[in-house]
Image (cartoon, grey):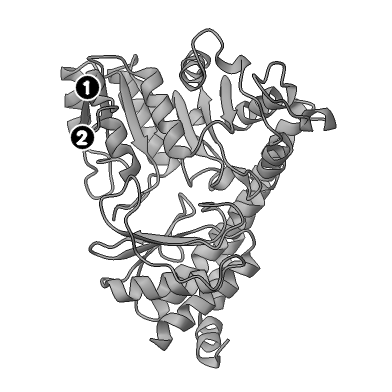
Amino acid sequence: MKSEVMNIYNEIKDSLTEPFAKIDEICAFNSEKVLNAFWKNNISEIHFNSTTGYGYGDIGRDAIEKVYASIFKSEDALVRNQFISGSHALSVTLFALLRPNDILLSITGTPYDTLHEVIGIKENGSSLKSFGIKYDEIDLINDEFDVPKITKYLKNNQVKVIEIQRSKGYSTRKSISIEKLENIIKIIKQISPQTIIMVDNCYCELVNKKEPIEVGADICVGSLIKNLGGGMAPNGAYVVGRKDLIKLCAERLTLPGEGKEVGPSLGVNRDFLKGIFFAPNIVKSSLKTAVLTSAILEKIGFEVEPKVNDERVDIVQNIIFHNKENLIKYCEGIQMSSPIDASVLPIPDAMPGYDDKVIMAAGTFIQGSSIELSCDGPLREPYIAYQQGSLTYEYGRIAVLKAVEHLINQ
């Protein structure tokens, strides 16, 4: 590492002490929560066993779902390798909960790009819209819920599902804290108690001490190649929440009448359990890497969000470059610093589910695993790099410093 970059690091490292201490404290709390879930559900070596075919009688799969329900304090859980991604789990959940003429309302603005064709924001013959499901959205105002507009809408319309995306996605807004989520849920439940509140929790798990179900959400969805997979899960996603809603999701994922009773684990039970066991510490490493990134990129003159001492809601760190050359160079630096495919040059290209070309740097052991260190962004103004993950802080620190060096060298 060049002395210039190390000098910059030495100038900012003292600013990391306080945020790192907060991250350590949350990790300790969530580690105890996870371990208690293992004890409560008597996890044993027998739960590592696997099934094939239909997956009848898979006690390991069933035990994993009990562990997730305990961690989230939910009535039930669906944790499956049959989910291809977090977006797939969100799609399954939306199709499970909504029927023709129902209204789906997003109160965090336009959802993440990969849901546009699911909902019908972008035309697709398989979308919710094509089945007669209505969609509307209400934008945030200065990163706050637009309570007057939400209140008016709920009083004038019978909304079946409200969707709340906590993490920012490829937007410029801030992510939604658990406190803001709790406040808006209380307001919604007072006006429209029958409305199902669905939370997209991707990137947010175990970042704080509470999860969405604990503050009143009805159902919550996330990916296992993000926080809760702990770098171990080879794929998969989870849905947690009310038992009746989980039944609908299970019957949408598999088939009516069989639901959670089928779905072979195909050897993933050990990895799913090991992943959730590691997850609090992996999230801690990801958060520390994000804080370091924020500090050092701001030091050399770039706009960042969140800043070093801001409250962390998810593991995502934004770097706003305002030009595509710097965005590409930084992503190149992250790829060059990865354990896998370090020699590969990431090139912006079209990707399924995205309107803009996207550059993605992710030299990961599991394809697309953003809990491992990754950095990506669409080639559009204001040219933001969205960095997330790192299995250890030490590896993350090396990668970030090398990426900064690559950026400076241009």
How packed mark 1 is, by other alpha carbons closer than 10 Å (few <14, some 14-19, many 20 or more), is some
| Residue 300: x %, y % from top left | 39, 81
Q: Secondary structure at mark 2?
A: loop
How packed mark 2 is, by other alpha carbons closer than 10 Å (few <14, some 14-19, many 20 or more), is few
Q: Is residue 134 above or below residue 107?
A: above
Residue 184 quadrant: top left
* Residue 216 showing in the rendered view: no
Q: Nearer the viewer, mark 1 or mark 2?
A: 2
Residue to which mark 1 is pinned: 154
| CB under 8 Å between discs 1 and 2 | no
Point out which mark residue 172 bears.
Answer: none
| Residue 272: x %, y % from top left | 67, 38
Q: Is residue 236 above or below residue 400?
A: above
Residue flagged by tag 2: what amino acid is it?
Glu
Residue to which mark 2 is pinned: 123
Q: Is residue 230 left or right of residue 89?
A: right
Q: Is residue 108 left or right of residue 366?
A: left
Query: How far apart are labels 1 and 2 at the CA level?
Result: 26 Å
Q: Is residue 306 left or right of residue 29?
A: left
Residue drawn at x 53%, y 88% is 7
Residue drawn at x 19%, y 19% is 155
Residue at far front of view: 53
Q: Nearer the viewer, residue 102 or 126?
A: 126
Residue flagged by tag 1: what amino acid is it?
Leu
